[in-house]
Image (cartoon, helix red, strand yellow):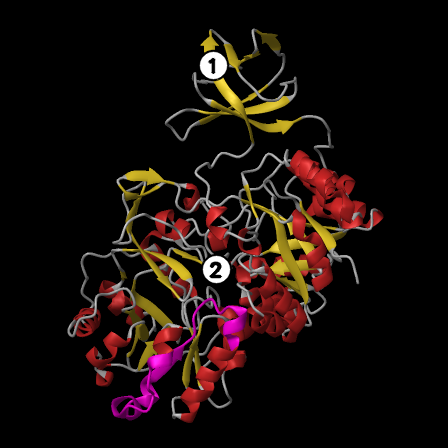
Amino acid sequence: MQKPELLLPVGNPESFYAALQGGANAIYLGLKQFNARGRAKNFTSGQLFTILKEAKKNRVLVYLTLNTVIKNHEIPELIDYLHFLNQTKIDGVIIQDWGVYFIAKKYFPNLVLHASTQMGIHNSLGANFGGKKGLQRVVLARELTLHELGEICKKSKVETEVFIHGALCYSFSGMCLYSSYAGGRGANRGLCTQPCRRTYSAVKKSEYLFNLKDNQLIDLVSDFEKMGVSSLKIEGRMKSGEYTYRVAQAYRMTLDDKNQGQNAKELLALDFGREKTAYFMGKDVRTAVSDKTVAGVLLGKVVKIQGAFIFLSSKMKIEPGFRLRFHIPNTEKQESVKVREVEFENGLYKIHSGGKNVKSKSEVYLSGISDVKFPSKLDEVRQPNNPINNGFKRKIINELKGKNQSGKEEFYFRINSMEWLRKMNFNEMEGLFLAFSKISWSRFDPELPFIQKFKHKVYVEFPKFIQEDAIPFYRDLADKMVRSGIRNFVISHLSQKDLIPPKCKIISNENVYAFNDAAAQCYKGEGISVFSYPQEIDFETLFSLSHKDGIVPVYFHPELFYSRMPIDMHNENNELTDDMNLRLHRYRRNGVTSIVPTIPVSISQSKNKLKTKGFFRYLIDLSYEPVSKNRAKTIKSRIVRSEQIQPSNTFNFNKGLK
């Protein structure tokens, strides 16, 4: 039984040296571009060579994060970047975008590729598909149960990597649109503004409904080893060297000696993170939400302020070098103070405020201890500049381009309820996507005469999340539909094509991201008849694509949060608002919670512009519309005439996506 590697996050020089000293087998880091922690300090190319040299001396592997989706205009820069990485002998490149995969595999085949958790791999179907495509490792979704993880490891031949400590996203990673919707800062572009850490109102008062505690799976290390998990991953590229070192020590201790569990937990008690949960690996996932967003160890409260001095209570002895964070009462404001000198008077600790505006009754958190120092600088190693051959680069770009295709306008509709079926006019559409729940599929009769009459227009759509034990259900569903003459399918993950019998038509939906020509080319090479553009795309990116034969989502309610995690809102109408008064609705289907804005996204008024630019396939998504006989016809007629639909908004289409 091989011991899993311990994989540590590195976002700055201190955390690099901390990881080495803490016992890492491997580290992961990002450079200044194309990584999903855009707000971390990250590294320069010169520093990367220093890291590689030092890591090799310590027998530590280095993985580089290239785990954002790439806009089409960034393809030339991406090619330069991959060419550079190809010369570094990096041990692995962690990717999200299938376009990055396509370019790397075809033109830089020596690069070792890992599937980021943002690639959405959550079952053995996805893991095995990644293995077949030549991915050396898949980073699995954080939402798996222990049983599901065991089944995936048993059934998959590819290496598996599991997050065992650090922050959790409320949504499945790669499936959160909230930050993008609220301000054009895409989580899939590495710029998440953490909307799950904000307050929401469901029954008059504001609550932290989606604010997850931090992941901590120290008790399960032995289980992971027995399952054959290849790598245990710590989250935290934006954390300090202290965090990296302390967490590394704890998990190293447990990996090397199973009797050190208690000592390891004592170390983790001072990781300066949030409250802890074992999430879906644990027993009660409902306790995973916290009403506190502040990270650190709660020490006590500010008792009084006298001039420039703070007097505070603390259950722990406060010493010089401590970093304290003060949570100002009844606000979201925080102030940080580094303790220079400290006095103990009448049971209270007295420290200088350092000019910070700390208020009485503020909660006091310990956010750091300067008990160990790490170097804060990395040398820049100058390497010979070996730029890519311009002819080779032009060849790659030209081979990614699509052929100009034009055709008559095609309208596709999506419904998620059988109540819609009798309301739809098949003569008015090219295809109808049936995004039904498992219960609805079990009641659906494909032999009904009107279904058989229009079976060439009926599409079976698979969901974004298929838990491990549901794979046979969807494979059987596909077989059943084909036996009834329905041979059209829509997939939400590229691996789902392996559920579908031969000689069927496959459309990939908006969740199979196509932000660039390389991704579009990849999907066509995988036998996808028609691909779709993402819901969060902007017009600038859309119009830059040479592959214009995809499906443009022109009317839809985006699923801002898409999560396995249930929430209790204490009301029956499932309505809530965020702290910017955005009205939302909660849905729970197939074991998944979706948070959806009540107002739809519509670019109906831009249809003529889309047509002029060469786009001719459009999707109207009625999944979150009240069932109505005339609604589908009304929406389509507005789009045909390129008229605005109100109320609606245009998401990122006009404002852009950063």
Left of 64 or right of it: where is 364? Answer: left
CA neighbours of label 1 inside 10 A, class few (<14), some (14 to 19), many (20+): some
Q: Nearer the viewer, residue 2 or 376?
A: 2
Residue at image position (59%, 24%) is 323
CB under 8 Å between discs 1 and 2: no
Q: Please state which amino acid type lies under the numbered disc 1.
A: Val
Answer whether residue 414 is magenta in the image: no
User: Of helix, strand and loop, which one carries label 2?
Assistant: loop
Does 240 appear above or below 389? above
Q: Please state which amino acid type lies under the numbered disc 2.
A: Lys
Q: Is residue 16 visible?
A: no
Residue at image position (49%, 34%) is 294
How far, Cα to Cα, is label 1 from label 2?
52 Å
Answer whether residue 454 is magenta in the image: yes
Residue 657 spot, x, y in % from top left: 41, 53
Does 138 appear above or below 524? above
Q: Nearer the viewer, residue 123 or 457?
A: 123
The residues colored magenta run: 442-471
Residue 108 spot, x, y in % from top left: 67, 67
Q: Which residue is mark 1?
A: 303
Residue at image position (42%, 28%) is 333
